[in-house]
Image: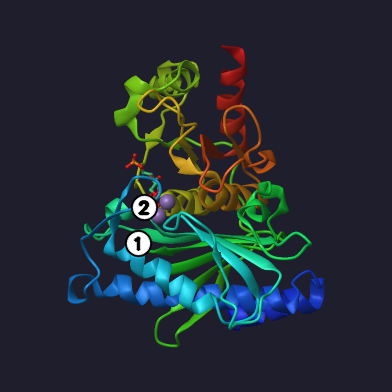
Amino acid sequence: MSSKVSLTRYLVEQQRIDGHIPAQLRLLLEVVARACKGISMAVGKGALGDILGSADSENVQGEMQKKLDIIANEVLIEANEWGGHLAAMASEEMEAIYVVPNRYPQGEYLLLFDPLDGSSNIDVNVSIGTIFSVLLKPEGAGVSEQDFLQAGTQQVAAGYCVYGPQTTLVLTVGDGVAMFTLDRERGSFVLTSEHVQIPKDTKEFAINMSNMRHWDTPVKRYIDECLQGVEGPREKDFNMRWIASMVADVHRILTRGGVFMYPWDKREPEKPGKLRLLYEANPMSWLIEQAGGAATNGQQRILDIKPGKLHERVSVFLGAKNEVERVTRYHSER
Ligand code: AHG
Ligand code: MN
Ligand code: MN
C-alpha cells in the first residue's frame, strides 16, 4: 500500500463513492472505533490497571462478569450515547435495551454489542475482542426491544475489534470486508487489508473438543471424519485450533481460512446453543458471508433467522463455504 488510508478516509470514500454510508452511520462507526481504542488501551494495562479479575456479579446470561466486561460495556455506552446517531443500544451485559437519554438527541440507528468477547481469556493474556452490529430503527415513535428483533440480513454495518498482539478492527458495510490495524503511535486505525476472502475449502477446524460426548450425531460425524485424516473419507489431515474467543477464532478464519463451530449440545438441551444471535452470530455471519464463506445453525442460514428475543442463543457453523455446507448437509441426512 503506497499511502496509508485511515479508517476515517475509508469511511469518507465509502460515503462519497458508493453513497451507501450516510453521514450518521459514518459517525457511528468512528465512535465505535474510538471506543474500541479505549478498550484496547485498558486491555493493554493488564495487571497495571484495575482491569483483571472478576466483578463478582452475574449478567442476564447467568454468567459471572469480569471487571473488563463491565468496563468495556461502559466505554461503549459513554462513547455512543451523546452523538445523536443512536436511538438505543443493546449489550450482552445488559438485560434490557439502553435507550439514549432524553438530554441527548436521538438518531435512527440501533447498536448491538458484545463488549468483551472471550472473557475467560482476559486474565491469561490471550486475545479477546469486541463484536458489534448496527441496525436501522424501524419507523415509528419511541424505541423498544421489539425494534432490535430484526434478521441479520437487515444489518447495515457489522464488525469486531480484536485485542491481540495487534489491535485490529474488522468491518463490513456490505461492500466486502476491510481490516484496519491500530497504529499505536498515531492513535488511528489504518487500512491493512481489503476485500478479504476465505478459501472455500480448509484443513483446519475450530471446536471445543471437550464437549464431544455432548454433541449431536451430525457434529460427531463431521469431526470424526476430520479426525480420521488421510486414511478417512476426507482423505486429508486436519489441524485444530480453539482459542475460546470467537473474535480471535473468526479473525484467524478471515486471515487464513478454516471453519468454526459452536453447536447445540446436551449439556443444556433447552438452549439452542451457547452463542448469542444478535450480537455474536449475526455480525460474524455477515462478515464471513461478505468474505465468501457461509454461516448456518445446522438447518438454515443464520442471517435469515427472525429473532424472538434480545438475548436469543443459536448454534453456529461458520467459515469455509464447502465445510459449512457439508456439516449442514449432515444435519439434514440423519
Ligand atoms: P463471552 O466471553 O462474550 O461470553 O463469549 C465467549 C464465547 C466465545 O467467544 C467463545 O467462542 C466461546 O464462548 C468459548 O466457550 P467455551 O469456553 O465453552 O469453549
Ligand atoms: Mn462473546
Ligand atoms: Mn462478552
Q: Quadrant of the N terminus?
A: bottom right
Residue for point 49% across, 50% down: 256
Residue at which label 1 appears: 69
Looking at the rendering, which quadrant does residue 66 occupy? bottom left
Query: Taking the image as drawn, is residue 3 in sight?
Result: yes
Q: Is residue 33 above or below residue 53?
A: below
For label 2, the crowd category at 10 Å Cα-Cα, with few meaning under 14, some 14 to 19 and many 20 or more, is: some
Looking at the rendering, which quadrant does residue 267 occupy? top left
Q: Quadrant of the C terminus?
A: top right
Nearer the observer, 332 or 225: 332
Q: Amino acid at mark 1?
A: Asp
Is 161 on the left-hand or right-hand side of 10? left
Residue for point 51% across, 50% down: 280
Q: Is residue 283 above or below residue 77?
A: above
Residue at which label 2 appears: 59
Nearer the observer, 168 or 27: 27
Foreground tag (1 vs 2): 2
Is 91 on the left-hand or right-hand side of 244? right
Q: How many marks?
A: 2
Residue for point 67% across, 40% down: 306
- What is the number of the mark on residue 1? none
